[in-house]
Amino acid sequence: MRDQLPLLLGVIPFGMIFGALALEAGVPPLGANGLSLFVFAGSAQFVSINLIATGAPALVMVFTIFIVNLRHALYSASLGPHMQHLPTRWKLLLAYLLTDEAFAVAQARYRRPPLDTAHWYMLGTGLALWFSWQLSTLAGVVFGAGIPASWSLEFALPLTFLAMLLPALIDRPAWAAALSGGALAILLRPLPYNLGLVAGATVAVGVAVLIEGRR
């Protein structure tokens, strides 16, 4: 939990923005907090309220959230080999708590021994995020209308992802992935549906695998 605290500086404003925007999109307060409780995925929640505001069918919302959260399959595949010894109840709990920020902190922990108790560390990172996300969503629902736009809280999100990225830049494949993916995402920004981000991420993984293979 202590190691997760720096990232919460970006997560909490992000949750407050979500709570406020959910109300603007016509989502009732209970529904906004329910999204944070049952979905518990910031980017997917923001996408969902945009779809709700435009009256998209429920099936479209579910499919879109599924696509947005596909990156979690990569996270779980990376951590999965370390968790094969855990009972199913532990796997279900940690899968629910798995987020971008939790993975960023936990995967660094899995680089150092002892590993047999590392799942308790991941539980701590996940719970720190879970509590902060629920409370910040509630704060956004309650006080959202009173948050001045001049605070520019939306800038907290890219800062959070930068804080997650920098500790992971430990070798050539990581640097190559970050630079190639970032550059391509910027160059392809005009593409519709944020396809530039998808292309950048795909190329970044390929570049990293290629360099790692040559090593």
Image: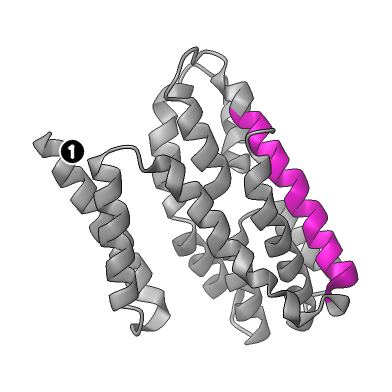
Crowding near the residue tagged with mark 1, few <14, some 14–19, many ≥20 C-alpha atoms within 10 Å: few
Measured along the vertical axis of the image, is residue 33 above or below residue 125? below
User: Which residue is depicted at the point 72% across and 62% down?
Assistant: 13
Task: Tell me where residue 151 appears, x and y as whole percent.
Answer: 74, 74
Q: Is residue 99 visible?
A: no
Task: Tell me where residue 119 appears, x and y as whole percent.
Answer: 57, 23
> In the rendered structure, which segment of residues is drawn in magenta?
122-144
Q: Residue furthest left?
A: 214
Q: Nearer the viewer, residue 81 or 213?
A: 213
Identify the amino acid type marked 1: Glu
Q: Which image quadrant is residue 11 in?
A: bottom right
Question: Which quadrant is home to the C terminus?
Answer: top left
Task: Tell me where residue 72 appears, x and y as whole percent.
Answer: 47, 48
Left or right: 165, with 180 as reference point: right
User: Which residue is depicted at the point 32% across and 54% down?
Assistant: 178
Colour scheme of the rendered structure:
one colour
Dot 1: what SS? helix
Q: Is residue 140 magenta?
A: yes
Q: Which image quadrant is residue 88 in?
A: top right
Left or right: 163, with 200 as reference point: right
